[in-house]
Image (tube, rainbow, N blue to C red):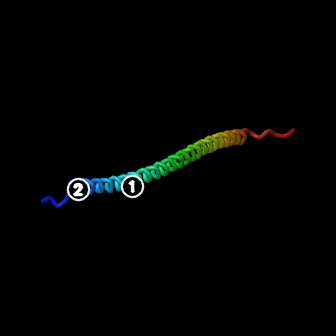
Amino acid sequence: MQDTDPKQAFAERKEKLSVALAKIRRNMEGLMAENQRLREVVRLAESELRKRRDQVQQLENELHGLDDKRLEARGRMENVMEKLDHLMTQPEKPES
């Protein structure tokens, strides 16, 4: 009255489990490969970010240096202008 032999049913279930495990293994291997690719992308992005951050820092330093030079030049120019104003306000001395 049983249609299938218990050994045959066991073998069929074992085969189904083997197929399911193989599929799970392939999926896991695919996920691990994708994970590795994503880690590499993140590593490259972090490297690029560090490089860009260093470039920004260097440009900011250069900008501060240029601002300092501009302020220094402005100070020298104001000093020269004050000296010129002072010379212009002094009475002329006759030549002897």
| Front in this rendered view, residue 21 or 14 | 14
* 53 horizontally vs 81: left or right: left
Viewport quadrant of the N terminus: bottom left
**Amino acid type of the residue that numbered disc 1 sits on in the rendered structure:** Arg
* Image coordinates for residue 3, horizontal then vertical, percent: 17, 61
* 80 horizontally vs 62: left or right: right
Point 26% across, 55% down: residue: 13
Viewport quadrant of the C terminus: top right
Image: 19 above or below 56: below
| Front in this rendered view, residue 83 or 35 | 35
- Between the C-alphas of marks 2 and 1, the distance is 26 Å
Q: Earlier in the sequence, mark 2 or mark 1?
A: 2
* Image coordinates for residue 35, horizontal then vertical, percent: 43, 50
* 11 horizontally vs 96: left or right: left
| Front in this rendered view, residue 50 or 23 | 23
Q: Secondary structure at mark 2?
A: helix
Report the residue marked by disc 2.
9
Point 53% across, 49% down: residue: 48
Point 36% across, 54% down: residue: 22
Q: Quadrant of residue 70?
A: top right
**How busy is the neighbourhood of tag 2: few (under 14 within 10 Å), some, or many (20 plus)?**
few
Report the residue marked by disc 1.
26
